[in-house]
Amino acid sequence: MVFCMATSHHSNDPLPGQTRPAAVGAKTHVPQPNISIRPNLWHNWARIALRAEARASAAHRYGLDTGNLADALEGETLESMVAVSAVRHSFHQL
């Protein structure tokens, strides 16, 4: 037994896997370029982090030198929090 399958192909239809060319004067969609501008602030955040770290170290030394540990620990903690936040922001800007 032989099976035959008849196919028809019209000359105006594209072959399988092919696309029909655009007609002359047809409008095509051209995507617009995507441009983003981001300020380069990482170096500013890095400077803020370094200054906060220096102030935290100074507060720590002040507490050791004067024996006023409560005030020194508060100052050191707050400046350390600023330094950590600034480092995170500087990495996020890269």
Image: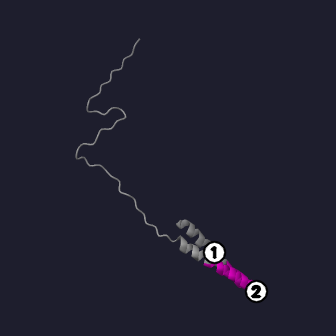
Queried whether the magenta region covers residue 4, the answer comes back as no
Of 6 and 25, nearer the camera is 25
The circle on residue 81 is 1
- The residue sitting at 36% across, 32% down in the picture is 16
In three-dimensional space, the C-alpha distance between marks 2 and 1, rounded to whole angstroms, equals 23 Å
Q: Nearer the viewer, mark 2 or mark 1?
A: 2
Residue 74 seen from this side: no
Point out the tag, 2 or 1, that comes first from the N-terminus.
2
Of 75 and 46, nearer the camera is 46
The residues colored magenta run 51-76
Residue 39 location in percent, x, y?
A: 47, 70
54 left or right of 40 in image: right
SS at mark 2 in the image = helix
Quadrant position of residue 73: bottom right
Residue 64 seen from this side: yes
- The residue sitting at 23% across, 44% down in the picture is 24
Coloring basis for residues: one colour
Say which quadrant the N terminus sits in.
Answer: top left
CA neighbours of label 2 inside 10 A, class few (<14), some (14 to 19), many (20+): few
* Chief secondary structure of the magenta portion: helix
- The residue sitting at 42% across, 63% down in the picture is 36
Queried whether the magenta region covers residue 61, the answer comes back as yes
Residue 57 location in percent, x, y?
A: 69, 79
Please name the residue that numbered disc 2 is placed on. 65
Give the residue type that dot 2 points to.
Answer: Asp
Residue 6 location in percent, x, y?
A: 33, 21
Quadrant position of residue 7: top left
